[in-house]
Amino acid sequence: MARSSGQTCPAMTYTNPGAYDRFMGRWSTRLAPSFIRFAGVRDGQRILDVGSGTGSLSRALLAFSPRIAVVGVDPVVDYVSFAKEAVRDARVEFRVGAAEALPFPEETFDAALGLLILQDLTDASGAVREMARVTRRGGTVATCKWDFREGLPMLSLFWQAAGSVAPEAVRQQQRRNSPPDASGLLELSQLWAGAGLNHIRTARLELAMQFESFDDYWLPFLGGATPTSAFASALNTETGGALAKALRDLIPDMRRDGSFVLPAVAWAVAGIAGSQASG
């Protein structure tokens, strides 16, 4: 899935993978290599990419090692079609399927990984149990999620700007949509333990994204790929561009050429399926 908008909206169907890839996909792409290293991926493994979305994790896995084989599964047909076009490699295949009911036999994969999937799951504990079920004994089950409390300025700056120009509209938007999952490493560890996984470990994954200009950062908000970006586009129009101006004024440490860097933090968790650790 790797789809994270800062707010969740169960009724919304993600149907514009190209716009999503420009909005949040670039963050997924930047995060994927450090998540792969955390998960302990090794050459020659067969890996399940759960909630494969636009293919960010699958692409990074293929680049990580020459003998890795990947199967990506996502519940949204449009995203599966997009990933098939975006990630052309004989070592990967993409299929339609839900994390909560994975269409594979037990112990099919050496590892089951999910990049930024938890915020989109209807049954997170059921999905983790499914990931463990299809992973061989001693294999790794891992995922990561953004630190929505304070680790994603890309979105928190937007909400700060929106609140300054249209506080009532923001309150209404927040009432219509569920707040982002603010759980941290303890809750992730408990989720993994509840699925029967062993040797559980967690990590804080940090990254930084450089933007060449304010437009480089802002224009993907206008694509309407998520509840947040759809709200951003509509509110900017309604305020005659005041939202964009307020947001530009909040960007920290903008250089003289207009470029700037924003950090991000993700929480990661991994565990071992079965009773033995992988060797």
Image (cartoon, helix red, strand yellow):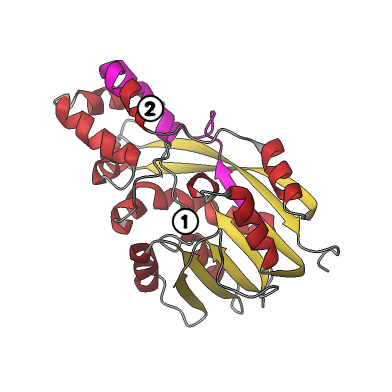
* 134 or 89, nearer to the observer: 134
Which residue corresponds to the image point at 36% horizontal and 66% vertical from the top-left? 77
Which residue corresponds to the image point at 34% horizontal and 53% vertical from the top-left? 14
- At label 2, counting other C-alpha atoms closer than 10 Å, the crowd grade (few under 14, some 14-19, many 20 or more) is some
Assign a secondary structure to mark 1: loop
- Evaluate whether residue 258 shows in this view: yes
Give the labeled residue for mark 2: 174
Give the labeled residue for mark 1: 1
Which residue corresponds to the image point at 64% horizontal and 62% vertical from the top-left? 131
- At label 1, counting other C-alpha atoms closer than 10 Å, the crowd grade (few under 14, some 14-19, many 20 or more) is many
Assign a secondary structure to mark 2: helix
| Vertical comparison of 62 with 175: above or below | below
Which residue corresponds to the image point at 71% horizontal and 62% vertical from the top-left? 140
Q: Is residue 70 magenta?
A: no
Image coordinates of residue 104 in percent, x first then y, are 59, 74
* 53 or 57, nearer to the observer: 53
Residue type pointed to by label 2: Gln
Please provide the residue range marked out in magenta.
142-169
Residue 61 horizontal side relative to residue 160, left or right: right
Residue type pointed to by label 1: Met
Quadrant in the picture for residue 233: top left
- Evaluate whether residue 251 shows in this view: no
Outermost residue toward the right in this view: 276
Q: Is residue 144 magenta?
A: yes
N-terminal label among 1 and 2? 1
* 138 or 248, nearer to the observer: 138
